[in-house]
Image (cartoon, coloured by chain):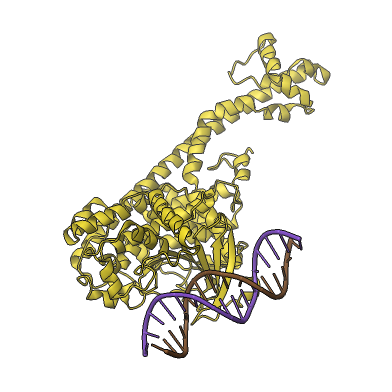
Chain colours: A yellow, B purple, C brown
Amino acid sequence: MDKGWGLTLDTSSSQSLPLFPSNDNKMFPLLGFPVNLSRASKEDDENRKVVGEVDFFSDRNKPTPPPSHDHNVKPNIVKKEIDETPLHINTGLQLLTANTGSDQSTVDDGVSSDAENKRAKTTELAQLQVELQRMNSENKKLKEMLSHVTGNYTALQMHLVTLMQQNQQRTGSTENEVVQGKVEDKNVGVGGGKVPRQFLDIGPSGTAEVDDQVSDSSSDERTRSSTPQNHNIEAGARDGARNNNGKSQLGREESPDSESQGWSPNKLQKMNPSNPMDQSTAEATMRKARVSVRARSEAPMVRIIIILCILHVFINQLSNSQTKLSDLLLLQISDGCQWRKYGQKMAKGNPCPRAYYRCTMAVGCPVRKQVQRCADDRTILVTTYEGTHNHPLPPAAMAMASTTTAAASMLLSGSMSSADGIMNPNLLARAILPCSTSMATLSASAPFPTVTLDLTHNPNPLQFQRPGAPFQVPFLQAQPQNFGSGAAPIAQAQALYNQSKFSGLQLSQDVGSSQLAPQAPRPPLQPSQQPSLADTVSAAASAITADPNFTAVLAAAISSIIGSAHNSNNNNSNNNTSRTTISSFSGN
DNA sequence: CGAATTTGACCCGCGC
DNA sequence: GCGCGGGTCAAATTCG
């Protein structure tokens, strides 16, 4: 208790903030650090109160532990002592010191020991005050860090918009690189081809250009479909699902002809502004949108969580979602819903069976998910969510629902407003995760528009951070898809893999154990050439995993993230020290 | 014994 | 029209 005045105050907080929380634990230390900080500051304000109320001094100094009833009478004793003792030491915090010298001290202590005790208490009080000051200063530092991070995110987003504008001005030639399948080729001739345009509604600057190219009806449609907050979108889809439930349980039939089928040019024509969709169609389409999460089932949870954190920040920023980060984390550990398996099939081109699950938290909930191991790398599980829950969700599930709905709504708002949204899916992907086009992609070739959040590999080390260009986000460096090919995790990640104890992803349980294919050997790891955000994240994860002293590691993680994202020449001493700390931690 | 899972059959859309 | 593949159903089976 005396030592380790770190970020999270004391042992009580470290105990209450396990590294990998269970579902009922609402706080995740690393990702919830804003909350943590606020708590810290709050505690900062309450420190005096705490010091004044807790009786750990009496426990420590008293030769014999006070009987249980002493706690009840303590306040009286304190007052009595202050009033009666002629000596002394008016520290103002003395309430507790008086405790030991009460009438009961006559039981075991003499007068001389009483004086010594008081002296010792005074000394301890002074130490405590010093520690309090230290804590306050640390809290200040943390607050500064937090504001720093917030500022960085804002700057990053601004930079994203700027870069996208530049990208649009240059050409649309690189736009199709991220798209899977051939739809892009078809689309080139459908809605005007590769017309440079601003991405959807990412910011005010983008709307004008969009409006220039779409009809009024389409903009109305887009407004209807994309402007509502998540909850509205969910509500709309929920209504649609309810209507569907009235007709059929599965909702397959209710969907009008267009949306449940492929995205052929004809279908795209139907989506055209000239054929504005009605509300029900939009809702049904929303429900048909899918969000696919690729995660390495044995990947260290910390790494996945941190990547999720980054994903979450960008998705939430773009969708105004208010989901708590910690909730999102919990959901990846266990996505918060109850699922019932209703089928399993062998899919073409993949030796691993695909399992079908249905949400059973409410009768008639239309949400489904599919779980399948990746054919290339069977350690990777692909979980695809479809639909919107028609019932209240626990926080953890709410996080996933909110985030996936945000991604899906962005996707669909683009596809519904005009065909160009499909034409430039990589823009959408970039917007969802601007730091790495290889981590969030959109597949328009699938029967349903699908956002894929890939948590299985690091982005290109050169992508996020360049020397001398701290905010350079290389949107122009769209990379071809290489899912499952193993994009050279860093050595620290390798160490993390080797010592990973956290392979208990809920995802890994989705496919029955009897169906689990033998795990493919891990791709060889290569050292990265330059530090990237993902490297830093992995290093932080390594540190967290390796070292129980979480507060110090948390500071290292925060600092390193700040350092890699900001990397300015502001002589942030925390930067260097934190990196060193990480290295030493990861080296252990 | 009830709930959950398995698994073969069936339905549907799409391409040829 | 037929075959293929994805998705779902529901009886059989397993599990707790």
Residue nearest the observer in this picture, A571 or A244: A244
Q: Position of residue A254 (x, y in %)?
A: 41, 64
- Which residue is located at x 55 percent, y 42 percent? A8
Residue nearest the observer in this picture, A567 or A53: A53
Q: Position of residue A583 (x, y in %)?
A: 51, 59
Tell whether A353 sits left or right of A478. Answer: right
Tell whether A563 sits left or right of A513. Answer: left
- Which residue is located at x 50 percent, y 47 percent? A32
Where residue A65 sits, quadrant-wise, is top right
Which of the image's four quarters has the C terminus of chain A?
bottom right
Q: Is residue A113 visible?
A: yes
Q: Position of residue C13 (x, y in %)?
A: 72, 74
- Which residue is located at x 64 percent, y 23 percent? A122
Where residue A341 sits, quadrant-wise, is bottom right
Q: Is residue A134 visible?
A: no
Which of the image's four quarters has the N terminus of chain A?
top right
Q: Position of residue A558 (x, y in %)?
A: 46, 50
- Which residue is located at x 59 percent, y 52 percent? A19
Instruction: Judge whether A54 appears above or below A309 on screen.
Output: above
Where residue A528 sits, quadrant-wise, is bottom left
Residue nearest the observer in this picture, A338 or A515: A338
